[in-house]
């Protein structure tokens, strides 16, 4: 890899704004805000709108579409 071309890769806390989940990982994301983590160190924090704590698919609140009914409706409508 070329030196000086890639952004800095460092520990960052991602915080879900609606689900209340926070997790520490490594990223190139930047932020002006910081938060003190459970290990006593201070890390930049990036607020996200959706994570596995609030996404309907992961929380079990997802809606299922009736694809079979839509296919039958299409066939009836267009005589296929």
Image (cartoon, rainbow, N blue to C red):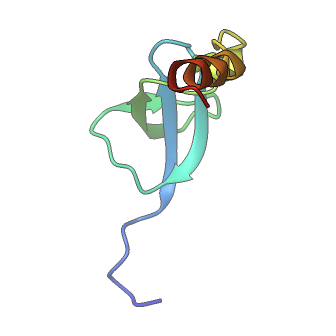
- x, y percent for residue 62: 64, 14
The number of numbered badges drawn on the structure is 0
- x, y percent for residue 69: 67, 15
Residue at x 64%, y 25% (from the top left corner):
71
Q: In the image, 56: left or right of 34? A: right
* Res 44 quadrant in image: top left
Foreground of the two, 66 or 5: 66
Considering only vertical position in the picture, is 4 above or below 61?
below
Foreground of the two, 37 or 50: 50
State which quarter of the image contains the C terminus. top right
- x, y percent for residue 23: 61, 33
The answer to whether residue 76 is visible is yes
Given the current orientation, which residue lies at the most extreme bottom position? 2
Given the current orientation, which residue lies at the most extreme front position? 79
- x, y percent for residue 24: 60, 39
Q: In the image, 28: left or right of 58? A: left
Considering only vertical position in the picture, is 76 above or below 3?
above
Foreground of the two, 37 or 26: 26
Foreground of the two, 78 or 5: 78
Residue at x 69%, y 14% (from the top left corner):
59
Residue at x 56%, y 52% (from the top left corner):
26
The answer to whether residue 53 is visible is no
Given the current orientation, which residue lies at the most extreme left position? 32
Residue at x 49%, y 57% (from the top left corner):
10
* Res 48 quadrant in image: top left
Considering only vertical position in the picture, is 31 above or below 64?
below
């Amino acid at each position: 890899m070329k030196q000086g071309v890639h952004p800095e890769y460092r520990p960052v806390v991602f915080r879900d704004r609606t689900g209340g989940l926070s997790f520490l990982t490594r990223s190139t994301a930047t932020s002006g805000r910081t938060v003190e983590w459970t290990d006593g160190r201070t890390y930049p924090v990036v607020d996200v709108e959706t994570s596995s704590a609030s996404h309907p698919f992961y929380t079990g609140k997802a809606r299922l579409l009736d694809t079979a009914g839509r296919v039958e409706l299409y066939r009836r409508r267009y005589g296929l």
